[in-house]
Image (spheres, rainbow, N blue to C red):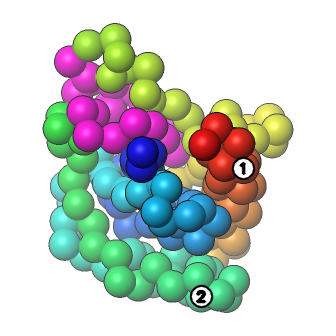
Amino acid sequence: MVTKVLMVCLGNICRSPLAEGLLQSKVDPQKVWVDSAGTAGYHVGNRPDERSVAVAQKYGLDIGYQRSRKLNAKDLETFDIIYAMDKSNYSDIVALAKNEAEIKKVGLLLEETELGVKEVPDPYYGGEDGFEQVYRFIDQACEAIAQRLQNDQ
Ligand code: 4NP
């Protein structure tokens, strides 16, 4: 069975495209399907933010092919695990849930790590440094998730 994982942030152009690309790069595509979406529709159809594309490129990861899309209620049926980048994303995702089972699918991405930080900071209004830190946080979480999924399968 394929496990379907959805990464969610606000705009689906900065953080969740990195999370999609990073997790995808660490799992067997036959066993794990990864996608991303935003709770807001501001950037639907757009490429990821150039700063996310650049930091990914620096580490040898191409995310430039991705396009932003808006999260919808059907996503909570389709996906098995849904990761929110921050608490505000978490509330917006859970607001679309139709039952307890759907709520249980949703978690904070950084709770998969020992970082002691719960939220991936929104780097949109910051500089390049923010993207580097965001990349490192997301990379650690995706490493932990990939290992856990491998052990579960
Ligand atoms: P993201 O970052 O949620 O990580 O994609 C943002 C992207 C766009 C906006 C805010 C955050 N915005 O306000 O347009």
Horizontal side of residue 30 vs 61, given as left or right: left
User: What residue sits 48% from the left and 41% below the top?
Assistant: 83
- Which of these two is toward me, 1 or 65? 1
User: What residue sits 31% from the left and 52% below the top?
Assistant: 38
Q: Which amino acid does label 2 sit on?
A: Gln
The residue at which mark 1 appears reads as 147
Horizontal side of residue 146 vs 84, given as left or right: right
Which numbered mark, 1 or 2, is in the foreground of this view? 1
User: What residue sits 23% from the left and 27% below the top?
Assistant: 96
- Quadrant position of the C terminus in the picture: top right
Q: Which of marks 1 and 2 is nearer the N terminus?
A: 2
Q: What stretch is highlighted in magenta?
A: 76-98
Question: SS class of the residue under badge 2?
Answer: helix
- The answer to whether 16 is drawn above or below residue 48 in the figure is above
Q: In this view of the protein, can residue 15 be seen by the observer?
A: no
Residue 95: x and y, percent? 27, 23
User: What residue sits 35% from the left and 83% below the top?
Assistant: 65
Residue 24: x and y, percent? 52, 66
The residue at which mark 2 appears reads as 57
- Quadrant position of the N terminus in the picture: top left
Q: Which amino acid does label 1 sit on?
A: Gln
Judged from this view, the residue extending furthest toward the top is 100
Q: Distance between the residues labelled 1 and 2?
A: 23 Å
Q: Does the magenta stretch include residue 81?
A: yes
- The answer to whether 86 is drawn above or below residue 50 in the figure is above
